[in-house]
Amino acid sequence: MKAIANEVGANEFLVAGNGSFIYDIQNEEVIYNNYIEKQKLLEIIKICEENSIFYNIYTPDMILTKSINYNISFYNNENRRNSPDRKININVTEDVYSYVQNYRKNDFLKITICDSDKIIFYGIMNKLKKIKGIDVLDISHMSRKTIKLGTKEAEIAYFYTEITNKDINKWTALKYLIELLGIRQEETIGIGDNINDKELIENAGIGIAMENSCPEIKEVAKYVASDNNLNGVAEAINKYINDCEM
């Protein structure tokens, strides 16, 4: 994220991990965090292992996984094309439970659960929702990503959910910045395309969805821009920011 921020000249703050932390770029420090407790994370891992379902864990510095599959296949493919400063640190280990148990830090942002079978996926979702103190993102559609394999393209399709601490989302993090910077809610813009952007788009002064967003997001947006693969974000910025400055 820091490399991308540098390319576009965004040199102040990064909200990441679905709102789990805010990073101050200029001072190179985390100024806000709400990480998943290690014991809670181990409880989730145990359920995933017992049900043989794919999962991966995010910290500010890496993605921890047992294998390259589903969403990790997409990130791994991106790494092949990216410059060294934009590569994602994918840490593959056979025994994730022990790795987390012995991990010296406690900076777990979120855990992602993936499966291509709808029945298996929702069965695990129901088990995870019984755990207290966490939020399990409700997903009603398959995620579809396209990766390039030489001259060909391949689609990866799977159901997924993201798990964070209770009441964590991008809007709660942005609210922290609003108070820190002394700006008004109506002066904010939220741009997104997936269900984990819903609270942000609903509460921001102007909520903007991409054309290829899930239906729930387009319903709550004030404006629907072009597909994000067709410069939808640039369109939104030109419409609501650049035009206002001219």
Image (cartoon, grey):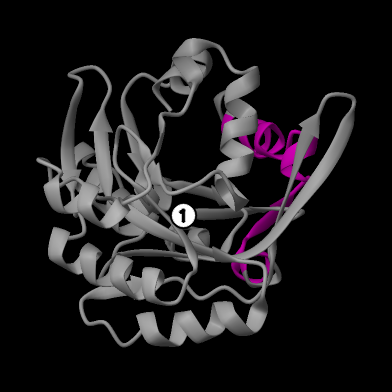
**Secondary structure state at the residue bearing disc 1:** loop
Rendered position, 84 above or below 22: above
Residue 77 visible to the viewer: yes
Quarter of the rendering containing residue 154: top right
Rendered position, 232 above or below 135: above
* Label 1 Cα crowd, 10 Å radius (few <14 / some 14-19 / many 20+): some
Rendered position, 187 above or below 26: below
Q: Residue at x 29, y 42 (%)?
A: 59
Please state the extent of the stretch shown in magenta in the rendering.
217-241
Query: Horizontal placement of 88 versus 245: left or right?
Result: left
Name the residue nearer the viewer: 169 or 238: 169
Q: Quadrant of the C terminus?
A: top right
Q: In x, y percent, where is residue 222?
A: 63, 60
Most extreme residue toward the right, as rendered? 151
**Numbered disc total:** 1
Name the residue nearer the viewer: 7 or 93: 93
Q: Is residue 230 magenta?
A: yes
Q: Residue at x 63, y 40 (%)?
A: 74
Q: Residue at x 49, y 12 (%)?
A: 84
Q: In x, y percent, where is residue 143?
A: 67, 60
Q: Is residue 67 magenta?
A: no
- The secondary structure making up most of the magenta span is helix
